[in-house]
Amino acid sequence: MNKKQRRWRNRIVAAIVIFAAIMAVDEAGLLASAFGPTGSVYAAFALYLIPYLVAGYDVLAKAARNIRAGEAFDECFLMTVATIGAFAMVAFPDTDPHMAEGAAVMLFYQVGELFQSYAVGQSRKSIAQMMDIAPEYANVERDGELVQVDPAEVAVGTVVVVKPGERVPLDGVVCDGTSQLDTAALTGESVPRHVEGGSEVVSGCVNMTGLLHVRTTKPYGESTVARILELVENASEKKARTENFITRFARVYTPIVVFAALALAVVPPLAGMGAWSDWILRGLTFLVVSCPCALVISVPLSFFGGIGGASRLGILVKGSNYLELLAKVDTVVFDKTGTLTSGTFSVVAIHPEAGVEADYVLSCAAHAEAFSDHPIAVSVREAYSGRIDRERIREVREESGHGVSAQVDEHVVLVGNDRLMEEHGASWHDCDLTGTVLHVSVDGAYVGHIVIADVVKDDAEATIRELHEAGVRRCVMLTGDRADVAEAVGGRLGLDEVRAQLLPQDKVAEVERLLAEEPSGAHLAFVGDGINDAPVLTRADVGIAMGAMGSDAAIEAADVVLMDDRPSKIASAMRVARKTMRIVWENIVFAIGVKVLILALAALGLANMWLAVFGDVGVAVIAILNAMRAMRVER
């Protein structure tokens, strides 16, 4: 509890103690003995007024402020009218006094409000923990000394020093040192990540062991931690349709029940159907029960708890509206590279011609690709264990869309696809393996080929299986890669449909087609990571981006961000969303059902003020307890 909540709690406890003491004295008949039958009623009135005001003076003050502002119809107004009315029943000598009930209603209402405040605080805690990832300073070396500066003041390209126990202040690349990074706050993963020279690091991670020197690659405003904090802060602004409905419902419902209670208290006695005191008491009981706290509090709290629970798993949901949509997804569309596959190519096979060494084929290819930054070229160089002597290489020429040619020593080396071989008259042959095939020729003679493939993520197959088990009807992959590669990946993962060799605009058209095929009430989610996926992420009902290595454009366009790039988190996000929606509807049905029942009993004179207290505070507390379950997630 914070300081304000502790003061609030202490005030309520004091009021309850005073109330209990007065009630004990009253029930023992001591007031009647001291003041007589008539005097004891007024003595009880004065005594019960003490705990009533101690507990509820702020509720009375807020109701008065709202009335002056023209916004009378809220729960404070209902509580004020009902409780003051209960005390005012002392004016009817022919009925039992109801001061104790009036004080109890205010006491229990405040207990419920305090409980709600605590529950909201707990649900915020998991999201608030995300705020702790914000680095307070960056260590920059100046004149031989380390100086702590605001991360926002650090220019791109500056080398910052991160000591053990400190947070990485900005995104960058390690230029010196090795260490283990705690990424749990960002990704939800408990296993530390090893980093060394050349490793990319993101802001918000905690350096656990060694000293690191990091060269920054982004300003603070564009860093990972800044983007996360912005997403978290804006999440509450995007409300679900259910949440908006409850808000609108409360605005219409509250004035209706106020006038209904007034009519219940006035019309029957005017029609000669009974005593004023009886009908006024029924009207007051009706007011207490009708307070919409259970709905107004528990529904937003359920959504907030769901968003907080997802954040603990390293899943950022940008608003409760996306959580609601995610619960109804029945088609999930995936990009391939960087989403279902790692996006890092590696050499999986080398097939030399007869009489040629495999290492010779790889050496020729690595030297020809020595100056290229293409991922395939990088994978070839990484696979080559020898040293690349760039002084041996001349006349490097990129053959657009085909490959590369270079002069290595006195030999002309060609590395590329079948079209490059055909253009230069080299006789080549195909490969049975699935992947990108790099053919290699030296001085026009074919020496062999290298097979390079994108590695499927280790949890991709389990992701598709879990989604199908969760009731997802279709899992589709859209990719710009070759058809044979796409079909091989799709077959291995168990995808329902694969579309290959698509340009960005083709992906949008495919998503439009799939959306048109969706049954009423069902939704489509698209999962991607690249800048070319941004248009599709925006068009889908729910856009899900890979956040750790995904592009800024994809993260900005997405509705849900997976901070550790693991596709299996999609199934986790859907489980959280469905659990949250289940809790929301449980609370709605429970709260409305109980209130309608007790309202009917109150109108018939079968519900007293104590049952009304349960219909208001008791229902609200039960609904809040149920809403808090949304925060609990399985890792």
Image (cartoon, rainbow, N blue to C red):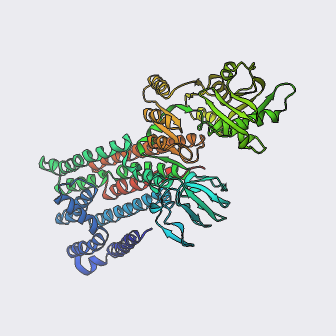
Q: Residue at 53%, 40% (x, y): give it.
A: 574
> Which of these two is toward me, 24 or 235?
235
Query: Percent x, y for residue 219?
Result: 47, 55
Q: Quadrant of residue 324?
A: top left
Q: Quadrant of residue 325?
A: top left
Residue occupying the far bottom of the picture = 34
Q: Is residue 366 above or below residue 280?
A: above
Q: Residue at 58%, 34% (x, y): give it.
A: 467
Query: Percent x, y for residue 549?
Result: 57, 45
| Residue 53 shown left or right of residue 471 in the figure | left
> Which of these two is toward me, 60 or 43?
60
| Residue 252 shown left or right of residue 576 in the figure | left
Query: Percent x, y for residue 49?
Result: 26, 72
Q: Is residue 309 above or below residue 427?
A: below
Q: Is residue 502 above or below residue 312?
A: above
Q: Residue at 26%, 81% (x, y): give it.
A: 34
